[in-house]
Image (cartoon, rainbow, N blue to C red):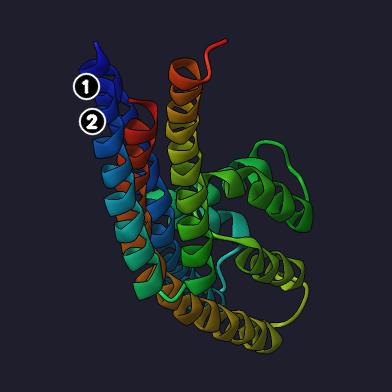
């Protein structure tokens, strides 16, 4: 009976450690996905002059898993509900954010980029995209650093905390 | 008697685990956390040892000072 209980505790705490570690691992990957998405947006806007609702639909098919949901949200809000772009962008970001491992600074960058999207001509738009890309690059290197120092620690700390709790309760 | 041996093993185990946690935390550059973990582990073990010594004194009083 004791052994079964302690196995449960050990399993739960190890799983918690793994989940916390995964949040640190996913953050740089998701930021990189955002960067490639912004680069596609730039290419489509500058060279293709594609409207944003079409762009969102295309991107929702091209981009890998966590981020494509954002563009699906954006294109449904633009197409089905007929919201203006700024509002649709804001709503999609708010709905999408709880699903990601990214933190507040990235959200601010994306929101700020959303307010400039579609308000200016192609040349200025390109500058805004470059600005957002630079910000995201800085955040990505930041996230990489915190991943390096935190991921392994969270994993081993989860397991060790489980063993400690078992020893305290036994 | 067997209970006491169990408690001693428990204290030893907690010491080992706390030392490992401290090493991991220190390696990752969180020295202040490592200090807190060590302090809390120390307090827990001190409490257990105090309970044991309390038992001992209680027993001594029962044996020698029994009115």
Residue A15 versus residue A136 in the image, above or below: above
Residue A158 versus residue A6 in the image, above or below: below
Q: Is residue A118 left or right of residue A13?
A: right
The residue to which callout 2 is attached is B5
For the residue pair B7 and B55, the one nearer the viewer reads as B55
Q: Position of residue A55 (x, y in %)?
A: 53, 60
Residues under numbered marks 1 and 2 in contact, where contact means CB atoms less than 8 Å apart: yes
Q: Position of residue B58 (x, y in %)?
A: 50, 23
Q: Secondary structure at mark 1?
A: helix
Chain to which mark 1 belongs? B
Neighbour tally class for label 2: few under 14, some 14-19, many 20 plus, Cα within 10 Å: few
For the residue pair A17 and A30, the one nearer the viewer reads as A17
Q: Position of residue A49 (x, y in %)?
A: 57, 73
Quadrant location of the N terminus of chain A in the rendered image: top left
At horizontal 52% and vertical 13% (from top left) the residue drawn is B66
Chain to which mark 2 belongs? B
At horizontal 73% and vertical 42% (from top left) the residue drawn is A82
The residue to which callout 1 is attached is B2
Quadrant location of the C terminus of chain A in the rendered image: top left
Residues behind callouts 1 and 2 on a single chain: yes
Q: Position of residue A20 (x, y in %)?
A: 42, 50
At horizontal 70% and vertical 87% (from top left) the residue drawn is A124
Q: CA distance from mark 1 to mark 2?
A: 5 Å
Res A39 seen here:
no
Quadrant of the rendered image containing residue B59: top left
């Amino acid at each position: 009976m004791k052994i079964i209980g302690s196995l449960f505790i050990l399993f739960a705490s190890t799983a918690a450690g793994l989940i916390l570690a995964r949040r640190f691992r996913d953050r740089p990957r998701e930021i990189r996905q955002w960067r490639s998405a912004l680069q596609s947006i730039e290419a489509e806007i500058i060279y293709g002059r594609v409207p944003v609702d079409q762009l969102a639909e295309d991107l929702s098919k091209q981009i890998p898993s966590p981020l494509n949901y954002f563009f699906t949200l954006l294109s449904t809000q633009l197409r089905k509900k007929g919201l203006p772009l700024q509002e649709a962008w804001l709503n999609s970001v708010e709905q999408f954010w709880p699903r990601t491992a990214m933190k507040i600074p990235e959200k601010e960058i994306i929101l700020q980029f959303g307010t400039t999207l579609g308000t200016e001509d192609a040349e200025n738009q390109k500058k805004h995209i470059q600005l957002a890309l630079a910000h995201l690059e800085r955040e990505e290197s930041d996230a990489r650093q915190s991943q390096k120092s935190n991921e392994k620690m969270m994993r081993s700390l989860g397991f060790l905390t489980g063993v400690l709790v078992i020893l305290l309760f036994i | 008697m067997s209970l006491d041996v169990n408690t001693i093993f428990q204290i030893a185990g907690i010491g080992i685990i706390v030392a490992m946690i401290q090493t991991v935390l220190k390696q990752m550059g969180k020295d202040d956390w490592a200090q807190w973990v060590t302090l809390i582990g120390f307090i827990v073990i001190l409490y257990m040892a105090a309970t044991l010594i309390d038992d001992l004194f209680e027993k001594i009083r029962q044996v020698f000072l029994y009115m």
